Image: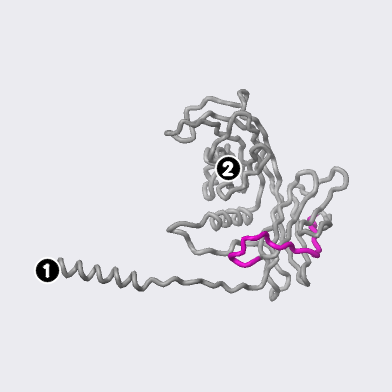
Amino acid sequence: MKRFSFLVALLVAVLTLNSCTTVIDAKLDTGPTQLSVDANLTDQPGAQTIRLTRTAAYFDSSTPPAATSATVSVSDDAGKTYVFSDSDNDGYYVWQPKGTDTLGHIGRTYQLNITYQNETYRASSRMNRVPPIDSLIFVKRKLNPLSKNEGYRAEFYARDIPNEVNHYRIRFFRNGELQNEPQNIIISEDGGFRGASTVTDGLVFIVPIRRAINPDSLYVLNDKVKVEVQSITSDAFDFWSQLRTQITNGGLFASPPANVPTNIVNTNPAGRKATGFFITSAVRSFSAVAAPPNIRTRED
């Protein structure tokens, strides 16, 4: 009887819970729009671009509206000022070099200055050193142990700059196309993971970082692969780390959404805030083709 009574009570509880199910249509208030800054300047030759947009509602998946009619410039600690102009009125502000000079120089600190809708925003970033990439190889592999499909796994080699804590972002291109999925955000501290710099300082980048430059489908014969290593600041490392967490945040154990950090500051503490990040990077790259001269035989 006790067992029967327990089962009846459990059934009543389940039915009660089901009957209380209510569909809630959440309505999120739309707050004031903010300036959003996408600025990643390098030491590479050619034009440099800063994109300005305005934030949109949480569930708005359309292209963010351009922030036009802003005044944008970058100055460095060597006394140079670089003016960016939006000639197409599309929110892309471009600096064009004169002669062979580049905007970015390793060791200099840069300040971004933006005036938009009577607000002034600033951010600063130092351009740190970056190591060269020594080589890029390919190894023939199956897509997975049970698959009959084969392809080529790429692996690059670079050595961390010793005796200092360095932060890097790694990007890779397949046949000229940047691989830009959330899982392709690759960042490293001293060629390893954050917190392991006492072990990895000055050494070749660890295996998981070296092999992170592969698409899910692997490469095929004659694919051209380009790898970039970019120097970033510690703050930029935190930005990319938290951005990756937020855009891959999902599933049963997802954490509540949180704001990604920004180094864009309104000079008026009571003024409207901004989002985005100002990053300066020295860049070194290496390209190779998945072809016999670059294919190695490896057991691992």
**Gap in angstroms between the C-alphas marked 2 and 1:** 67 Å
| Callout 1 secondary element | loop
- Can residue 278 be spotted in the picture? yes
| Callout 2 secondary element | loop
- Can residue 83 be spotted in the picture? no
Classify 27 as above or below 245.
below
Q: Which of 47 and 44 is in front in this view?
A: 47
Q: Quadrant of residue 253?
A: bottom left
Residue 125 drawn in magenta: no
Which amino acid is tagged 2? Answer: Gly
**Quadrant of image for the N terminus:** bottom left
Q: How many labels does the image show?
A: 2
Q: Nearer the viewer, residue 227 or 281?
A: 227
Task: Kindly identify which residue carries mark 1.
Answer: 1
Classify 70 as above or below 227.
below
Give percent across and percent down for residue 230: 66, 45
Q: Which of 133 and 179 is in front in this view?
A: 179
Give percent across and percent down for residue 256: 50, 64
Q: Nearer the viewer, residue 149 or 250?
A: 149
Task: Kindly identify which residue carries mark 2.
Answer: 191
Q: Who's the residue at 55% across and 48% down the image?
A: 183
Dot 1 alpha-carbon crowd within 10 angstroms: few under 14, some 14 to 19, many 20 or more: few
The chief SS type of the magenta part is: loop
Give percent across and percent down for residue 141: 50, 30
Classify 295 as above or below 113.
above
Q: Who's the residue at 13% across and 69% down the image?
A: 2
Residue 60 drawn in magenta: yes
Q: Which residues fall within the magenta stretch?
A: 56-77
Which amino acid is tagged 1? Answer: Met
